[in-house]
Image: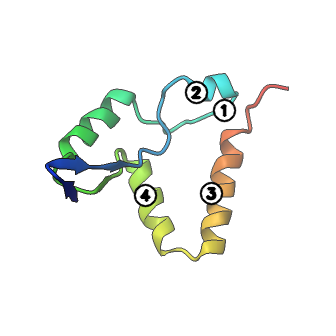
């Protein structure tokens, strides 16, 4: 946690969020978190952590990718992204 002159800094890494972006972009995000859940978990972490990963998918990806080598992270994220754009309209 960083504190500069009484200001708390928090990095939020939510992963997929149901915000309407996926539909507009023609993407499928099956395990997306709801925005209110992301906000709730983020606000709870404020002042207590430097980074928060709201939702189980974000935690799983974040921690599993952290221990993978760079080439492995690249391949895993390519598969994740490929799965998200599979429903893109022609």
Q: Earlier in the sequence, mark 4 or mark 1?
A: 1
Q: Which residue is labeled 1 in the image?
A: 27
Alpha-carbon span between mark 4 and mark 1:
21 Å
Residue extending farthest front:
5
Alpha-carbon span between mark 3 and mark 4:
13 Å
Q: Which residue is labeled 2 in the image?
A: 21
Q: Which mark is residue 60?
A: 4
Q: Disc 1 vs disc 2: Cβ atoms closer than 8 Å?
A: yes
Q: Earlier in the sequence, mark 3 or mark 1?
A: 1
Alpha-carbon span between mark 1 and mark 2:
8 Å
| Residue at 20%, 45% in the rendered image | 46
Alpha-carbon span between mark 2 and mark 4:
22 Å
Element type at mark 3: helix
Which image quadrant is residue 29 in?
A: top right
Nearer to us of marks 1 and 2 is: 2
Alpha-carbon span between mark 3 and mark 1:
15 Å
Q: Earlier in the sequence, mark 3 or mark 4?
A: 4
| Residue at 34%, 36% in the rendered image | 38
Element type at mark 4: helix
Q: Disc 3 vs disc 1: Cβ atoms closer than 8 Å?
A: no
């Amino acid at each position: 946690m960083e504190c500069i002159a009484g200001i708390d800094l928090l990095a939020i890494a939510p992963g997929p969020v149901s915000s309407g972006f996926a539909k507009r972009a023609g993407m499928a995000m099956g395990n997306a978190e709801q925005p209110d859940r992301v906000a709730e978990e983020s606000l709870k972490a404020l002042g207590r952590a430097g980074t928060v990963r709201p939702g189980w998918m974000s935690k799983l990806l974040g921690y599993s990718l952290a221990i993978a080598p760079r080439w492995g992270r690249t391949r895993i994220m390519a598969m994740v992204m490929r799965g998200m754009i599979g429903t893109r309209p022609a």
